[in-house]
Image (tube, grey):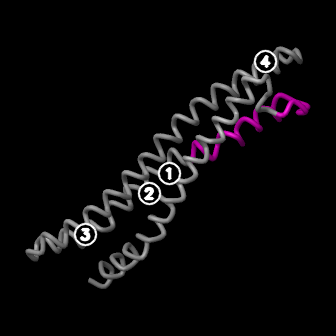
Amino acid sequence: MLIETGFAQITQALLWPVLILVALGFVYALWTVGVTLMDALLRRRGRRLLQPDADSLEQLELQVLRQLEPTRLLGRVCPLLGLIATMVPLGPALQQVAAGQGHQALAVFGSAFSGVVLAMTAAAIALVVYSVRRRWLLAELLDIKKERGWE
């Protein structure tokens, strides 16, 4: 019983940090859309997203990974945070339902599902941005390889 109580308290303490991370993830996802739109404009004007001063193919590949990694992580971590944001309030809400306090439980369910919706939206945005930027960066990498005869 002591372990269950301790786990429940730790779990409840995680709710606000997880919700804050979900909100930050959502804001970051929107920011990446803006960055991607700006990069699209730069690409239309003939500018590259990769810094051409790299001395080796490995350095260019590392640039690609550095640019893509935050968005990839966002797309993978946000659904997990959304699941946590949903599951934490469900335990107490189910206890309220069992105690006949269904109306109070509905309010908890609403906030729980808001967290998962924001998290999944952030993950979906991140997936699209990651895919588009990956395609652009890999195309640039191929162009630079051809220009420098690294094939």
Q: Are marks 2 and 1 in contact (CB under 8 Å)?
A: yes
Q: Tell me the CA gap for discs 3 and 4.
A: 54 Å
Identify the image quadrant of the C terminus. Answer: top right
Is residue 5 covered in magenta?
A: no
**Residue toward you, 150 or 104:** 104
- Classified by dominant secondary structure, the portion drawn in magenta counts as helix
Q: Tell me the CA gap for discs 3 and 1.
A: 22 Å
Give the residue at mark 2.
Answer: 81
**Residue toward you, 47 or 76:** 47
Q: Please name the amino acid that badge 3 sits on.
A: Gly
- Left or right of 81 in this view: 113: left
Q: Tell me the CA gap for discs 2 and 3.
A: 17 Å
Tell me: residue 92, above or below residue 119. Answer: below
Q: Where in the figure is residue 1, as x and y percent of width and height?
A: 26, 83
- Left or right of 59 in this view: 42: left
The disc label shown at residue 77, or none: 1
- Left or right of 136 in this view: 107: left
Give the residue at mark 3.
Answer: 91
Is residue 53 covered in magenta?
A: yes
Question: Which label lies toward us, 3 or 4?
Answer: 4
Disc nearer the start of the sequence (2/3): 2
The disc label shown at residue 143, or none: 4
Q: Where in the figure is residue 107, as x and y percent of width and height?
A: 24, 68
Secondary structure type for disc 1 = helix
Q: Where in the figure is residue 102, as x and y percent of width and height?
A: 12, 70
Q: Please name the amino acid that badge 2 sits on.
A: Leu
Q: Please name the amino acid that badge 4 sits on.
A: Asp
Secondary structure type for disc 2 = helix
Q: Residue furthest toward the bottom?
A: 2
